């Protein structure tokens, strides 16, 4: 791995190396350690100037500070605060850094080998998780969820592709307790907020299994099959797709013609809800008119 340099005044380097092989100082968050094995650890260095992929930083102890020059290369390992890989271009003026490396003896400058830089100011990183909806705020395009690790976070969905199964939905349609199969985006640790790109809400497939629906006809689109009728089932309107293969029967399961079906009739229909539209009942096998 290429050597990285942290250049300090020669007289200060000599003082540090003379101090029983271990130096530790920490005031206002700044810390510098050099062990007898030559390992160097710097915590709380503040970047005050960038020069391409290199930068100048300082460690502060009250009103005192130590100037550092950091030269990065392709082999320099740089991460964000919580471990996601980063680059020198991601480091900005004002960022706080932790730096680790090796300080060779018989040197009058800091020279890092196998260096590692963690930018404590980079608190946004990619995240994929799952969990359970706690509450939703449709007006703000966001919801709160409990992740699989037990953390409570806010999820912003204004720029997300959000679906329940294969049906696009919005945050206002989420229900407390629903399972979030997967949510992906950029998590801001400082805000405890995930800005989502995609959100997948679990859809129970049994909803789409063929079954009987009982209700009342509220509208009829034509006079003969194929056609649509609207049926109110327990307060919800469904569009029922009738085909020429749909069997039409009275309450005694005797065959009847469709012209005998009227708005207001009580019916039982056997069909399946569409996966792409929960308001449509399709593949209708039979339709019984209980009013006949």
Image (tube, rainbow, N blue to C red):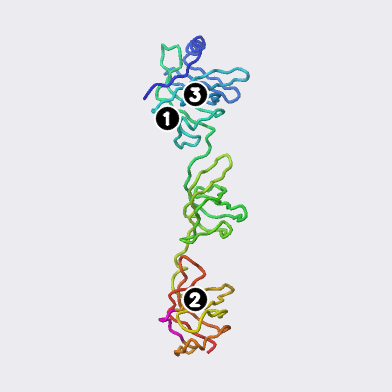
Q: What whole-number distance in Å separates the C-alpha atoms at marks 1 and 2?
A: 61 Å
Asked which quadrant contains residue 282, the reply is bottom left
Q: Position of residue 160 (x, y in %)?
A: 51, 51
Q: Position of residue 30 (x, y in %)?
A: 56, 23
Q: Identify the secondary structure beneath mark 3.
A: strand
**Residue 244 belongs to the span the image colors magenta:** yes
Front of the two marks 3 and 2: 3
First in sequence: mark 1 vs mark 2: 1
Q: Is residue 291 above or below residue 48?
A: below
Q: Is residue 283 above or below residue 110?
A: below
- The residue indicated by pointer 3 is 51
- The residue indicated by pointer 1 is 77
Would you say the residues marked 3 and 2 are in contact, meaning their CB atoms lie under 8 Å apart? no
Q: Position of residue 273 (x, y in %)?
A: 47, 71
Asked which quadrant contains residue 237, the reply is bottom right
Which stretch did the figure color magenta?
243-248
**Residue 246 belongs to the span the image colors magenta:** yes
First in sequence: mark 3 vs mark 1: 3
- The residue indicated by pointer 2 is 240
Near-viewer residue (35 or 73) = 73
Q: Position of residue 246 (x, y in %)?
A: 43, 81
Q: Identify the secondary structure beneath mark 1.
A: strand
Near-viewer residue (164 or 176) = 164
């Amino acid at each position: 791995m290429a050597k990285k340099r942290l250049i300090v005044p020669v007289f200060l380097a000599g003082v540090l190396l003379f101090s029983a092989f271990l130096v530790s100082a920490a005031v206002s968050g700044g810390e510098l350690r050099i062990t007898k094995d030559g390992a160097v650890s710097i915590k709380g260095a503040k970047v005050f100037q960038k020069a391409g992929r290199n930068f100048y930083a300082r460690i502060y102890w009250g009103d005192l500070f130590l100037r550092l020059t950091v030269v990065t290369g392709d082999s320099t390992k740089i991460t964000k605060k919580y471990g996601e890989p980063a680059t020198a271009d991601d480091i900005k003026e004002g960022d706080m850094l932790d730096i680790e490396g090796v300080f060779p003896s018989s040197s009058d400058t800091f020279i890092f080998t196998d260096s590692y830089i963690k930018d404590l100011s980079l608190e946004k990183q990619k995240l994929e998780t799952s969990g359970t909806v706690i509450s939703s705020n449709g007006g703000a395009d966001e919801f709160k969820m409990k992740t699989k690790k037990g953390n409570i976070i806010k999820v912003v969905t204004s720029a997300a592709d959000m679906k329940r199964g294969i049906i696009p939905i919005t945050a206002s349609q989420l229900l407390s307790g629903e399972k979030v199969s997967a949510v992906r985006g950029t998590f801001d640790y400082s805000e405890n907020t995930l800005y989502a790109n995609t959100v997948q809400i679990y859809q129970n497939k049994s909803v789409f299994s063929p079954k009987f629906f009982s209700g009342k006809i509220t509208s009829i689109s034509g006079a003969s099959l194929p056609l649509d009728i609207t049926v109110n089932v327990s307060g919800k309107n469904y569009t029922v797709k009738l085909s020429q293969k749909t069997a039409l029967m009275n309450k005694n399961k005797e065959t009847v013609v469709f012209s005998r079906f009227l708005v207001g009739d009580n019916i039982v229909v056997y069909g399946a809800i569409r996966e792409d539209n929960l308001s449509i009942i399709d593949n209708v096998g039979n339709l019984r008119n209980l009013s006949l």
